[in-house]
Amino acid sequence: MKKKLLLCSALLTLTCQAGAAAQAQVTMAPGHVPAGMSLARGGVVPISGALINGSILGLIKQPRRDAAPSGMPVCEDAGKQTLCRVGLGNGDFEHPHDPKAIAGWVLKAGEYSPHPYLGSTPDSRVLAMPGRDALAASGALLPQASTSAASAVHTYTVRLRARGSGPMPANVETTLMLGGSKEGDAIHYLASADETVGWDWKDIEFKVETAVEPSEALMLIGIERKDNNTPTMLWVDDVRIIRTPAGVTPDAD
């Protein structure tokens, strides 16, 4: 199987083409497969750097208005912090927004789906994804020297929650990528996970020992709906990327 990722000049666009995926299928780039995982598909697939615009870079340069989760500081240096989170903006979707945007996120409609939007449950605000190929993406600059040309120095664990609100299951694909910190730099696929969810909230998690270059790195996450069950709304919440020393899995939240 091949996965193509493309950043369009008008808006960050991730088009992940693949066959039907099994529940919680995790795919990794060669050389970044944690112990105990098999490489189901993959290859490092560069995104054409010439097509990158400032969508994500512009978002992450805006003043930050979100607070770090309790006990989980944002990563601010390359090595001293043994447990921290990559500084995604508004991963819990609780922070300021307007009717057509969600702070910290780039949103894309699918061919037959409206844009994702800010939804709500009795307990919290959530990312609502109405139909197939609806996509939301965010990113953060990593601290200088977080990556090394010699070997991977950190493990990055992606965590989020998802559920369907309707009579049929929904499928969500989460993709982690890494690239340079300047417009036009290539973006490389690191790993992804496919999960089918029903009515109850389900925790989704996968991890990767990050690619070793570039030294100034932009980490990106894309969340895309992959099913055609439009009577069901897909809800996503509590998106975070946790950094630990290489080979270390963070404790449960």
Image (cartoon, helix red, strand yellow):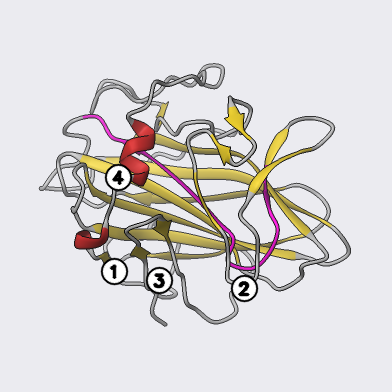
User: What residue type is disc 4 on?
Assistant: Gly
Number of the label disc, if any, that sits on residue 39: 3
Q: Quadrant of the N terminus?
A: bottom left
Q: Which residue is mark 4?
A: 54
The CA distance from mark 3 to mark 1 is 15 Å
Horizontal side of residue 125 vs 33, given as left or right: right
In percent of width and height, residue 83 lies at 40, 26
Q: CA distance from mark 2 to mark 3?
A: 14 Å
Amino acid type at circle 2 is Ala
Name the amino acid type tagged 3.
Leu
**Residue 218 at least partly seen:** yes
* Callout in the foreground (2, 4): 4
First reached walking from the N terminus: tag 2 or tag 4: 2
Residue situated in front as seen by the camera: 243 or 61: 61
Q: Nearer the viewer, mark 3 or mark 1?
A: 1
Which span is picked out in magenta?
127-143
| Residue at image point 42% right, 61% down | 13
Q: Secondary structure at mark 1?
A: loop
Other-residue count near label 1 (Cα within 10 Å), few / some / many at <14 / 14–19 / ≥20 = some
